[in-house]
């Protein structure tokens, strides 16, 4: 009789370990996920009253080390100068992590030009496109770190214009 209990106990333990392993694997963040933001002047710091608006959508694949994005904007009151994703929480200005487009000649080699609105800008970001911001701990090329910040809601996209050089529209990535 003891032998039967031993077999049942061993089988129960094995099933429990498999279930626990499955639960632990389920706790790992997904390797592919999507984030988005609605860009408005009200989210800029300080807030801007503008008719401009936009959206930012990104599909992140951590296994491939790629971020596929689509930025849309329209109604800018100034001429578009540049657009980035920044490392920073809501209501705080943060440093640039990677460029989406620029007309200022200040982006990494290969950064696309920002078209006049209404516009759609699409692209792919990899580790080579991540430029920081180093003063808050994200080194150039630190793809996993900016992805962790994006996943945490501690990154935002914005579009800068000639009228609003510090940024005309902004949206926190979620």
Image: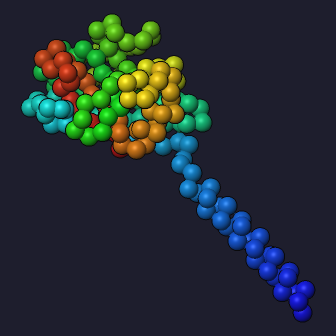
Q: Residue at x 59, y 32 (%)?
A: 64
Q: Nearer the viewer, residue 34 or 9?
A: 9
Q: Quadrant of residue 8?
A: bottom right
Which residue occupies the extreme bottom position in the image? Answer: 1
Q: Is residue 90 visible?
A: yes
When the figure is inspected, residue 22 is found, relative to residue 69, above or below; the finding is below
Q: Position of residue 20 (x, y in %)?
A: 65, 65
Q: Residue at x 24, y 14 (%)?
A: 81
Q: Nearer the viewer, residue 117 or 138?
A: 138
Q: Residue at x 70, y 71 (%)?
A: 16
Q: Position of residue 128 (x, y in %)?
A: 51, 19
Left or right: 92 with respect to 66? Answer: left
Q: Position of residue 23 (x, y in %)?
A: 61, 62
How many numbered dots are placed on residues in this image? Answer: 0
Q: Nearer the viewer, residue 58 or 170?
A: 170
When the figure is inspected, residue 173 is found, relative to residue 129, above or below; the finding is below
Left or right: 73 with respect to 147? Answer: left
The colour scheme used here is rainbow
Which residue occupies the extreme left position in the image? Answer: 49
Q: Quadrant of residue 92?
A: top left
Q: Quadrant of residue 42?
A: top left
Q: Is residue 51 visible?
A: no
When the figure is inspected, residue 60 is found, relative to residue 123, above or below; the finding is below
Q: Quadrant of the N terminus?
A: bottom right
Q: Residue at x 51, y 22 (%)?
A: 141
When the figure is inspected, residue 107 is found, relative to residue 135, above or below; the finding is above
Q: Position of residue 174 (x, y in %)?
A: 35, 44
């Amino acid at each position: 009789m003891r032998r039967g209990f031993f077999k049942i106990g061993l089988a129960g333990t094995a099933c429990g370990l498999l279930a626990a392993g499955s639960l632990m694997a389920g706790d790992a963040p997904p390797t592919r996920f999507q984030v988005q933001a609605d860009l408005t002047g009200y989210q800029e710091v300080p807030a801007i009253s503008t008719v401009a608006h936009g959206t930012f959508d990104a599909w992140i694949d951590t296994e491939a080390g790629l971020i596929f994005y689509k930025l849309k904007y329209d109604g800018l009151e100034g001429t578009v100068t540049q657009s980035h994703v920044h490392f920073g929480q809501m209501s705080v200005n943060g440093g640039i992590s990677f460029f989406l487009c620029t007309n200022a000649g200040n982006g990494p080699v290969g950064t696309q030009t920002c078209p006049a609105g209404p516009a759609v800008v699409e692209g792919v970001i990899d580790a080579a496109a991540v430029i920081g911001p180093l003063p808050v701990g994200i080194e150039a090329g630190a793809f996993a770190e900016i992805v962790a910040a994006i996943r945490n809601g501690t990154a935002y996209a914005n579009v800068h214009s000639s009228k609003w050089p510090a940024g005309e529209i902004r949206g926190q990535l979620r």
